[in-house]
């Protein structure tokens, strides 16, 4: 669905606070704003009109100022604790992200709590990697912890807690055969084979995600009054803001009696930790159906892949799924062996070889 054109608002300066647009607009004509303080630290982000962003900025300025942080920390433990305090005070971070920060900080503190800042060397980071591998941690998890540590170091430099020297970078090699189900893109046939093996509500969730490419969080937060049959759309609301998705005949059939315009949730899996339970059910069904394992997010990648193969313009596909076009093409488009063969044939890369062979044959024929 094409979005109407909106004029890009000008940036806003409120004293030491600067508000600028990061991306947008969304379907409602709102832009994604970011507010930075005098230290260029992000203190607020969100979808808003210019007036709404100005009010949010004024609210930020009205908040009590935090006490100055400790200057010149001596250990990584102090740095990580200071960084976690800064992150926990941010209002633009979701509870799930806060929980992730606490989890990663806890792992880093377990190994680095007493490590002096002066030991910020490559061998120190390599020792962390070795220790985490010995504990059985996955390389992807270790890399995420190091990203967290680098962010803490950067924040420390911005606030004068550590020297203005870059933290060494470790290039960790990820085995693509490990945790394949985290990155596998299923086919429609794969999905059709596992749906009958799922409990009804879980089967509904899988079919909805496959048909819309929605994020699992968007489905779990979806209310029935977000279905607008008159306009022929459903309103999905995720981390990139609200967007309209066309209400297809297949979706109407799937939704059925749930299109009652009530404020009740669209789906109720009846379990705690619904994200994890849905993931586990899918993996179990994949094992039963002898299907390559995939996760709920794989259904989103499948939707992107099918639109790309159908020739949908990247900007249109990104509008449907709530992606940045570059991110969508880089991380969600599945490239298969058949794609590689078709690309080679389309480009006729063998033309030079055939031409050289032909000329060689002609040369041999004219030679006495």
Image (tube, grey):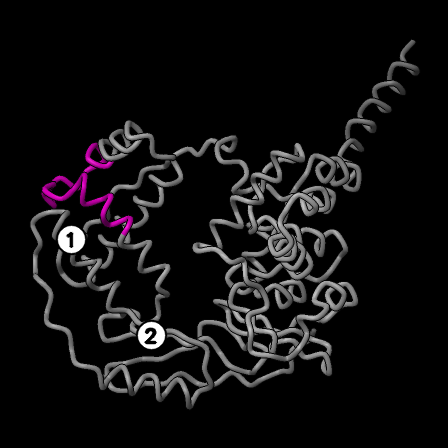
Whether pointer 1 and pointer 2 mark residues with C-beta atoms closer than 8 Å, the reply is: no
In the rendered view, does 207 fall on the left or right side of 295?
right
Q: Is 92 rendered above or below residue 277?
A: below
Quadrant in the picture for the N terminus: bottom right
Magenta stretch holds residue 12: no
* Residue 79's disc number: 1
Question: Bounds of the magenta span?
Answer: 103-125
Q: What secondary structure prevails in the magenta region?
A: helix
Residue 143, image x, y percentages: 35, 41
Q: Looking at the picture, tell me which residue is in the foreground, 233 or 3.
A: 233
Mark 2 nearby-residue class (10 Å; few <14, some 14–19, many ≥20): some
In the rendered view, does 79 fall on the left or right side of 174?
left
Q: Which residue: 52% across, 75% down?
A: 24
Q: Looking at the picture, tell me which residue is in the foreground, 202 or 230.
A: 202
Q: Earlier in the sequence, mark 1 or mark 2?
A: 2
Which residue lies under the disc numbered 2?
Answer: 44
Most extreme residue toward the bottom is: 51
Q: Which residue: 30% across, 41% down?
A: 169
């Amino acid at each position: 669905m094409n979005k109407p054109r909106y004029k890009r608002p000008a940036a806003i300066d409120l004293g030491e606070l600067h508000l600028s647009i990061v991306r947008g607009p969304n379907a409602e004509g709102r832009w994604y704003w970011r507010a930075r303080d005098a230290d260029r630290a992000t203190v607020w982000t969100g979808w808003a009109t210019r007036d709404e962003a100005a009010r949010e900025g004024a609210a930020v300025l009205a908040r009590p100022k935090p006490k100055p942080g400790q200057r010149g920390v001596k250990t990584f433990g102090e740095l990580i604790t200071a960084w976690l305090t800064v992150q926990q005070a941010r209002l633009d971070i979701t509870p799930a992200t806060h929980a992730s920060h606490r989890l990663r900080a806890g792992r880093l503190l377990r190994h680095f709590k007493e490590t002096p800042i002066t030991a910020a060397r490559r061998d120190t980071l390599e020792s962390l990697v070795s220790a985490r591998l010995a504990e059985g941690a996955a390389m992807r998890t270790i890399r995420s912890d190091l990203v967290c540590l680098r962010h803490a170091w950067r924040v420390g430099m911005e606030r004068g807690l550590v020297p203005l020297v870059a933290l060494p970078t470790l290039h960790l090699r990820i085995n693509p055969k490990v945790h394949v189900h985290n990155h596998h893109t299923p086919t429609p046939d794969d999905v059709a084979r596992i749906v009958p093996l799922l409990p009804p509500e879980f089967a509904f969730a899988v079919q909805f995600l496959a048909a819309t490419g929605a994020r699992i969080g968007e489905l779990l937060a979806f209310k029935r009054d977000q279905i607008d049959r008159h306009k022929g759309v459903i309103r999905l609301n995720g981390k990139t803001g609200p967007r309209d998705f066309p209400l297809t005949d297949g979706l109407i059939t799937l939704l059925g009696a749930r299109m009652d315009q009530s404020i009740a949730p669209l789906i109720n899996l009846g379990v705690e930790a619904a994200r994890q339970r849905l993931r586990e059910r899918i993996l179990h069904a994949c094992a039963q159906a002898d299907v390559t394992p995939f996760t709920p997010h794989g259904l989103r990648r499948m939707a992107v892949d099918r639109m790309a193969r159908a020739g949908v313009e990247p900007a249109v596909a990104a509008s449907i799924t709530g992606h940045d076009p570059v991110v969508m093409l880089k991380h969600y488009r599945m490239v298969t062996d058949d794609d590689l063969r078709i690309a080679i044939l389309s480009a006729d890369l063998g033309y030079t070889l055939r031409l050289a062979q032909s000329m060689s044959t002609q040369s041999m024929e004219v030679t006495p």
